[in-house]
Image (tube, rainbow, N blue to C red):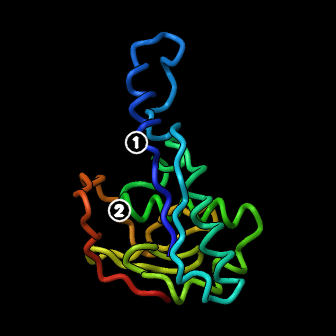
Amino acid sequence: MGQWVLDPRDVERMCSQAAEPRIWGLPAAEWRASGVIFLSRELAGLPLSQMVAVVAHECGHAVTRESEFTKRDGISSEWASELCADYHAFRWGFEKEIRAHAPFRSLAHHACLPGETISEAGREWRVDRWFHFRPVAGRREALPAPRPALPGAAPRSSARRR
């Protein structure tokens, strides 16, 4: 329904300035570059609350910063990105709309919302109110090491909502 896309010209411009001392210490270009939110025409056929949920979520992608993403990464980079977007939408007051739209979202892509449990590779994780994955009580496994992302690959999981 929606997608945040970086402006490749802006990323290229920022990368070409990498040697300039004035930008040393700043996050990588992909975390600072401008971009565009694309919305499907199908979105216009949805109820207003679902339209709002999609737009708020995509705006959340646009404002996500590297440090926020890094804190949530570990199980799946895609899920970390989605958790960051939802975190911002909740922060802005769109929790009700995001929760109402959740049954219509792809669980394999979006992971889950705070208070929900998801399983991956035989482990169960619950998303806390700060949108971090936590092992389910009684399980003491540490977060798995981050996996390198495969371009275009969906995460393999046995995800389910509870």
| 89 vs 7: above or below | below
User: What residue is shown with label 1?
Assistant: 8
Q: Quadrant location of residue 78? A: bottom left
Q: Quadrant location of residue 57? A: bottom right
From this viewpoint, which residue is outermost toward the front?
41
Sort mark 1 into few (<14), some (14-19) or many (20+) by Cα contacts within 10 Å: few
**Residue lying at 30% horizontally and 58% vertically, measured from the top left:** 144
Q: Quadrant location of residue 73? A: bottom left
- Residue 4 in the image, given as x and y percentages of width and height: 50, 58
**Residue lying at 57% horizontally and 52% vertically, measured from the top left:** 62
**Residue lying at 69% horizontally and 80% vertically, measured from the top left:** 97
The dot on residue 76 is 2
| Label 2: element kind | loop
Q: How many marks?
A: 2
Left or right: residue 28 versus residue 157 is: right
The dot on residue 74 is none
Mark 1 or 2: in front is 1
**Residue lying at 49% horizontally and 82% vertically, measured from the top left:** 105
The front one of 9 and 104 is 9
- Residue 2 in the image, given as x and y percentages of width and height: 51, 70
Report the amino acid beneath label 2.
Ser
- Residue 152 in the image, given as x and y percentages of width and height: 26, 63
- Residue 43 in the image, given as x and y percentages of width and height: 57, 81
Left or right: residue 98 versus residue 112 is: right
Report the amino acid beneath label 1.
Pro
Disc on the earlier residue, 1 or 2: 1
Sort mark 2 into few (<14), some (14-19) or many (20+) by Cα contacts within 10 Å: many
The front one of 24 and 145 is 24
| Label 1: element kind | helix
| 104 vs 4: above or below | below
From this viewpoint, which residue is outermost toward the top?
21
